Image (tube, rainbow, N blue to C red):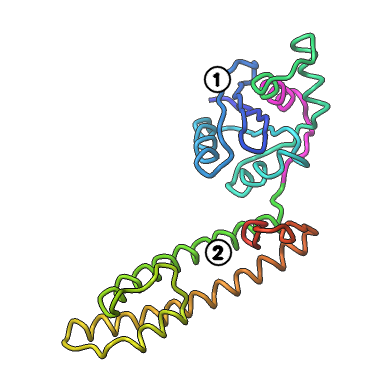
Amino acid sequence: MSRVVIGMDPHKRSATIEVIDQREQVLAKGRYGTDTGGYTRMREAGRRFVDRTWAVDGCAGIGRHVAQRLVADGETVVDVPAKLSARVRVFDTGQGRKTDPVDAHSVAVAGLRSPGLRQIQADDTAVVLRLLVDRRDELGRARTETVSRIHHLLLELVPGGAKKLLTRGQASYLLRTAPAPVGVVAQTRHQLARELIDELTTIDAKIRTADKQLREFVTATGSTLTELNGIGPSGAA
């Protein structure tokens, strides 16, 4: 199969793509969300074509995020300046009317016709932030699972049970003040609850470290997102 160019018109919540060959014949097209699921489907749609180059509109602006995700996944991406794709659109259609499919086609044609377009390289800061965010998400899921298991055990050990949103200190206090376990089943539950509380202590310490790293990297980029109410270091990253 010959080389193809995948033109992309990116937006905050979606991206429209069109795949063309060397003769500018349209091979595929589609509109995808920019969330994890949508991005994955779009990337897999592109990977149907072995020899491919992604041409993304505005890699220094609105297209930067999706371009960096593609580069991080091993894709070849070139930056198509907005003025260049607009010129192609006017030449091809005879007017400047913009729609997402028309823009994606113009970007693809510009990527095919224009030698010397800037190839996008991985942004080390973006890669580090992505790695740290993924790790923070893993820790969050591990904490939720651990708290759930502690809660389940405390339901059997503490009269009236325990609230769902437990901190490490609250769980430890409830276990210390619970009636002395009688019998091998209660003793085993008590032992497992103590081990899980210790695990929760470790996870909480790792979360604090991860949040500190994220906060430092976000601050180093010059972003002030963390100053907004409700946006923590992970969300800002």
**SS for tag 1?**
strand
Residue identifier under label 2:
136
Foreground of the two, 155 or 121: 155
Q: Does the magenta stretch include residue 31?
A: no
Q: Which residue is nearer to you in this view: 152 or 135? A: 152
Q: Are marks 1 and 2 in contact (CB under 8 Å)?
A: no
Q: What element carries label 2?
A: helix
Task: Report the span colored magenta.
Answer: 105-120
Q: Which residue is drawn at 76% across and 32% down?
A: 80
Q: Residue at x 64, y 21 (%)?
A: 101
45 or 101, which is in the foreground?
101
Write down the quadrant of residue 46 in the picture: top right
Question: Residue 149 in the image: x percent, y percent?
Answer: 34, 70
Relative image position of residue 96 (x, y in whole percent): 79, 15
Report the side of 121 relative to 195 (left or right).
Answer: right
68 relative position to 169: left or right: right
Q: Residue at x 67, y 21 (%)?
A: 105
Residue 119 lies in the magenta stretch: yes
Q: Residue tagged by mark 1? A: 27
Residue 63 placement (x, y as % from top left): 71, 38
| Amino acid, disc 2 | Arg
Which quadrant of the figure contains the C terminus? bottom right
